[in-house]
């Protein structure tokens, strides 16, 4: 499959293989790195289980 993602450099048009898939609710997050770097927007899709981890 060919990726259509554009949120990170080099992703759009890259070749990808899906190893596994599940039906779940996911969330895209924005965050401010603790090192004071730039805010990262729509970085990763997190599942309900990952949001509950510390």
Image (cartoon, rainbow, N blue to C red):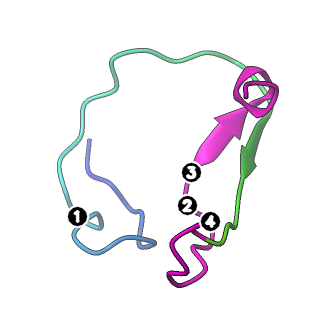
How far apart, in angstroms, are the residues tagged by discs 2 and 1?
A: 18 Å
Q: Are marks 2 and 3 in contact (CB under 8 Å)?
A: yes
Q: Which residue is mark 1?
A: 13
Judged from the image, the secondary structure of the residue bearing numbered disc 3 is: loop
> Which numbered dot is residue 40?
none
How far apart, in angstroms, are the residues tagged by discs 4 and 1?
A: 19 Å
Seen at 43% across and 14% down, the residue is 20
Q: Which residue is mark 2?
A: 43
Q: Which residue is mark 3?
A: 44
Judged from the image, the secondary structure of the residue bearing numbered disc 4 is: loop
Q: Are marks 2 and 4 in contact (CB under 8 Å)?
A: yes
Q: Which residues, given as a range, are shown in magenta?
A: 33-54
Where is residue 38 drawn, in percent x and y?
Answer: 53, 85
Left or right? Give the position of 28 relative to 3: right
Q: Are marks 2 and 1 in contact (CB under 8 Å)?
A: no
Q: Is residue 45 above or below residue 17?
A: below
Where is residue 30 drawn, in percent x and y?
Answer: 69, 67
Judged from the image, the secondary structure of the residue bearing numbered disc 1 is: loop
Closer to the chain start, of discs 4 and 1, is: 1
Left or right? Give the position of 44 relative to 27: left
Q: Which residue is mark 4?
A: 42
Seen at 78% across and 33% down, the residue is 51
- Few, some or many residues within 10 Å of mark 4 (<14, 14–19, 20+): few
Image quadrant holding the N terminus, namely top left
């Amino acid at each position: 499959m060919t990726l259509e993602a554009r949120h990170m450099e080099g992703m759009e048009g890259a070749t990808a293989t899906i190893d596994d898939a599940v039906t779940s609710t996911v969330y895209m997050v924005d965050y401010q790195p603790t090192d004071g770097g730039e805010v990262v927007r729509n970085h990763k899709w997190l599942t309900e289980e990952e949001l509950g981890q510390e």
